[in-house]
Image: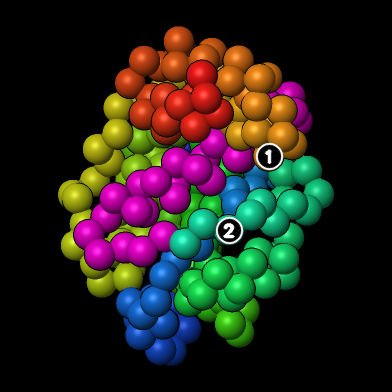
Amino acid sequence: MTFWRKTIMAMAVATTPGAAAVAQGGGVSVGGFETEGSVGLSRDDYDALGRALTALLAAEVRGTAGAQVIPIPSAGGKPGSVDLSAARTAANAAGAKVLVVGSLLDQYGDIHVEARMINAATGEPIAVIRGDPKLVKREQLAQAIADLADRLAQQQGRTTRGGATRASVPVDALVHFGKGLRLEDAGDKAKAAESYRAAVRGAPGFTEAAAALQRVGS
């Protein structure tokens, strides 16, 4: 086990008093996925990957029993980070009680994922959810996100699906999907469709990419 992984695994999970009550009530918004500190891909690819993982986590959380996911606009921030203030403002405006912000640390293909649960109204931390220590390779990212959503559901007292259920999605397909989301946000549906097509070609079972391609009219 590398030093950085030992350091991460040694960090304490923070849970505040009353966290369960906040986590169980109201909707959840996924405010973004931070990739700052990751190395091995280009910064542009990590930006796209962060967008893709945000969409995947929201989809996976929505798939857990009783979860209400409230979409919010991208919170922006400097590359690789999430503007928490903007994310909280968006979550509050949408009526969400809990803001979830994901984090990916990728060291040349060796990964660690986690998610912070934050009280959207007060900004107080609820919990930090660690990913499965067995899902540690970049090519396992889609499965790691599915497992993370299951752990979030468990923290909220919801019925879980018993671990990662998503098939592997190649990283290139995730990056193409994220670039498509970025282009769609910028209003360029034609180029977004090209990226979504590339994602579907790379992963024919990638349902979110297929739905996005249909959404932009291609």
Residue at 39% across / 40% down in the picture? 144
**Image position, residue 100 (x, y; %):** 51, 62
**Residue that label 2 marks:** 72
Examine the rendered structure and indicate whether residue 86 appears above or below residue 122: above
In magenta segment, residue 101: no
Lateral position of residue 14 relative to residue 164, left or right: right
- The residue type indicated by label 2 comes to Ile
In magenta segment, residue 50: yes
- The residue type indicated by label 1 comes to Asp
Camera sees residue 12: no
**Image position, residue 23 (x, y; %):** 39, 76
Examine the rendered structure and indicate whether residue 179 appears above or below residue 200: below
**Image position, residue 66 (x, y; %):** 25, 65
Numbered range of the magenta stretch: 40-69
Whether tag 1 and tag 2 are in contact, CB under 8 A, the answer is no
Residue at 24% across / 38% down in the picture? 165
Single out the residue that lies furthest toward the front. Answer: 217
Report the Cα–Cα distance between label 1 and label 2.
12 Å
Q: Quadrant of residue 166?
A: top left
Lateral position of residue 13 relative to residue 40, left or right: left
Q: Secondary structure at mark 1?
A: helix
Camera sees residue 55: yes
Residue at 45% across / 10% down in the picture? 201
Dot 1, crowdedness within 10 Å: few (<14), some or many (≥20)?
Answer: few
Q: Secondary structure at mark 2?
A: loop
User: Which is the main secondary structure of the residues drawn in magenta?
Assistant: helix
**Image position, residue 110 (x, y; %):** 53, 31
Residue at 74% across / 36% down in the picture? 186
Dot 2, crowdedness within 10 Å: few (<14), some or many (≥20)?
Answer: some
**Residue that label 1 marks:** 185
Q: Quadrant of residue 41?
A: top right
| Label ID, residue 86 | none
